């Protein structure tokens, strides 16, 4: 069954995207290798299911993900049929030969480049045109400022924010005004920088990774209401919080979650305890936690799409099954009763695993 398409208004341009989008980090060989053909097969599977949103970034495999996405779209003649999101904020600089058997920043890539942050006018412009070249002249529909924020940059945050405010934003606005891109925004995993930039510019959308999930809903309080008020669409990334919501209890090796990751690092004890509590409720209602995680984020009216990654076809097929799964309303009520979900968090309609919304 094809996924239902949803519509959202991004700036002055209505962009129609599927509720499930294709996250492109795995196509950059994040944490494990895949061949070009394996990447193409995953993309082809999602296209057949009705997916129209692809998200990638120069950082993913140091160009590898963008190259694979661009080649797939060219081979299948889909360059005009897919809404493509990529990112800017890092430039790739050539380095000496690399060992693709060793992960760099988590990516097993043979491409001999090293990323460096640059949010300046020239940096954003160069990043955009470099991405266009890697994707075989397929222009991004959506361009997102990647990983700006205090938590990411620590003592260098003010420096990089100044770069963005004094030049990078102007580059994004010019690209949109010229019709090179249709929308721009942020691709981050920090709530605070989203709220700060909403005061300083008019982004069309935000890709928020890991900050609105079964595990945490702080974005409910201030960010999401502001986004709805200002007409800013949210793409939800990191919906499994770096894997812990998808992997817990899947094998005897990680039943106690010793190997699970949260926020790109080993999970601490409070996180493990909450995941264990969520897992118990999931077992009681026979609901896979990954299915609950996916459907939960899609229930919020500010969110236009979720971007789960797929390391292989079986994961993609499982994600589709989770999307279509019928989850009883009592399950969500129980989570709230036990204090595992914020009382104000929207939940899926009763026995509904396929939700369509329009954001205006």
Image: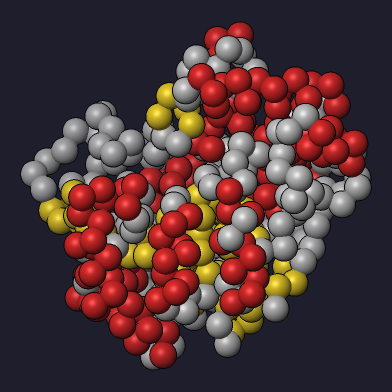
Is residue 1 shown to the viewer in this render? Answer: no
Q: Horizontally, is 224 left or right of 124 in the view?
A: right
Q: Horizontally, is 70 left or right of 119 in the view?
A: right
| Residue pictured at 77% horizontal, 66% vertical | 357
**Image mark count:** 0
Q: Is residue 12 above or below residue 263?
A: below
Q: Residue furthest bottom?
A: 178
Which is more toward the observer, 194 or 57?
194
Coordinates of residue 103 in the picture (x, y in percent):
28, 32
Which is more toward the observer, 102 or 291?
291
Q: Horizontally, is 199 left or right of 102 in the view?
A: right
Snapshot quadrant of residue 301: bottom right
Coordinates of residue 202 in the picture (x, y in percent):
47, 79
Snapshot quadrant of residue 244: top right
Q: Horizontally, is 211 left or right of 46 in the view?
A: left
Coordinates of residue 247 in the picture (x, y in percent):
59, 25
Coordinates of residue 272 in the picture (x, y in percent):
56, 21
Q: Is the C terminus in the top left, top right, bottom left or bottom right quadrant?
A: bottom right
Which is more toward the observer, 56 or 218?
218
Is residue 205 shown to the viewer in this render? Answer: yes
| Residue pictured at 43% horizontal, 24% vertical | 266
């Amino acid at each position: 069954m094809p996924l239902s398409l949803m519509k959202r208004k991004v700036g002055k341009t209505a962009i129609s995207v599927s509720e499930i989008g294709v996250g492109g980090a795995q196509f950059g060989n994040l944490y494990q290798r895949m061949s070009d053909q394996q990447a193409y097969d995953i993309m082809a599977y999602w296209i057949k299911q009705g997916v129209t949103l692809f998200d990638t970034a120069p950082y993913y495999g140091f160009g590898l993900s963008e190259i694979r996405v661009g080649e797939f779209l060219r081979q299948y003649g889909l360059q005009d049929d897919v809404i493509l999101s990529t990112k800017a904020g890092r430039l790739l600089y050539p380095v000496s030969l690399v060992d693709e058997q060793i992960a760099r920043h988590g990516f097993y890539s043979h491409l001999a480049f090293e990323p460096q942050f640059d949010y300046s006018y020239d940096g954003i412009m160069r990043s955009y045109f470099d991405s266009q070249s890697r994707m075989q002249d397929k222009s991004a529909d959506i361009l997102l400022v990647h990983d700006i924020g205090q938590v990411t940059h620590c003592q260098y945050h003010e420096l990089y924010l100044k770069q963005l405010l004094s030049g990078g934003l102007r580059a994004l606005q010019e690209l949109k005004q010229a019709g090179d891109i249709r929308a721009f925004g942020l691709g981050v995993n920090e709530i605070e920088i989203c709220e700060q930039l909403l005061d300083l510019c008019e982004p069309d959308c935000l890709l928020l990774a890991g900050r609105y999930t079964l595990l945490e809903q702080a974005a409910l309080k201030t960010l999401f209401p502001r986004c709805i008020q200002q007409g800013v669409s949210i793409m939800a990334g990191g919906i499994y919080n770096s894997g812990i919501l998808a992997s817990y209890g899947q094998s005897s090796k990680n039943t106690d979650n010793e190997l699970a990751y949260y926020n790109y690092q080993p999970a601490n004890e409070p996180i493990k305890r909450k995941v264990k509590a969520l897992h118990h409720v999931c077992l009681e209602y026979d609901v896979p936690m990954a299915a609950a995680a996916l459907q939960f984020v899609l229930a919020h009216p500010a969110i236009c799409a979720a971007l789960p990654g797929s390391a292989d076809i079986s994961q993609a097929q499982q994600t589709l099954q989770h999307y279509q799964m019928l989850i009883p309303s009592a399950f969500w009520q129980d989570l709230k009763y036990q204090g595992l979900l914020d009382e104000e968090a929207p939940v899926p309609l009763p026995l509904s695993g396929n939700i369509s919304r329009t954001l205006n």
